[in-house]
Amino acid sequence: MPVLFNFHIYIEAYNHLKDDYEAPVKILPLIFISVLMVRTIVPPGRRLRFWGTLKFTFTAPLHRVRFRDEYIGEALTSWIRPGQDLFFALSYYFCVIWGTVSGKNGLAESGDILQDSWLLHNVLLPSVAIFPLWLNYLKTLRQAYDANKGWLY
């Protein structure tokens, strides 16, 4: 619910601010991402179980695959495109923070830097798309090995 509220506030700000005053419109998503990043860590007691579950899912090819690992792995493969969008948003976030702290670039320049980034568009974003599929492939190989069945499982 807070994410929908944040999105609503962003759209309202985007539609009602004038073109010459665009800094708050570009700062709002950065604030929302900051809140979400803090919420992935705080409170640590509740978040450790979440991160532990992801750890077992990512290391599923190294141990016997359980239903939970299979289910979360399949969900991750369906989140490839949103995962790329999230990675791009995080890249923008860190580019803006780095540019602001170092004083080298601002909000508009950070967007141009990421738009022209060969490394981001040709290496990192495709890697984010391939990683869940590769993980699912390795998990399937592990299941075939554990069941003593040949390929295809």
Image (tube, rainbow, N blue to C red):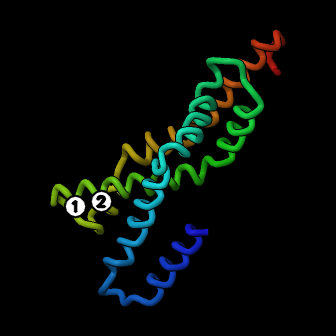
* Callout 1 secondary element: helix
Please identify the quarter of the rendering in which residue 132 is found.
top right
Residue ID at (68%, 36%): 73
x%, y% of residue 67?
Answer: 77, 31
Q: Residue furthest left?
A: 103
x%, y% of residue 146?
Answer: 77, 13
Q: Is residue 62 above or below residue 44?
A: above
* Callout 2 secondary element: helix
Please identify the quarter of the rendering in which residue 113 is found.
bottom left
Q: Amino acid at mark 2?
A: Val
Q: Amino acid at mark 1?
A: Thr
Cα distance, mark 1 to mark 2? 6 Å
Viewer-proximal residue, 70 or 122?
70
Residue 8 appears in the picture as rendered: yes
Which residue position holds label 1?
100
Which residue position holds label 2?
96
Q: CB atoms at circles 1 and 2 under 8 Å apart?
A: yes
**Left or right of 47 on screen, residue 35:** left
Residue ID at (50%, 79%): 9
Residue ID at (76%, 20%): 143
Categorize mark 2 by other alpha carbons within 10 Å: few (<14), some (14-19), many (20+). many
Residue ID at (44%, 83%): 13
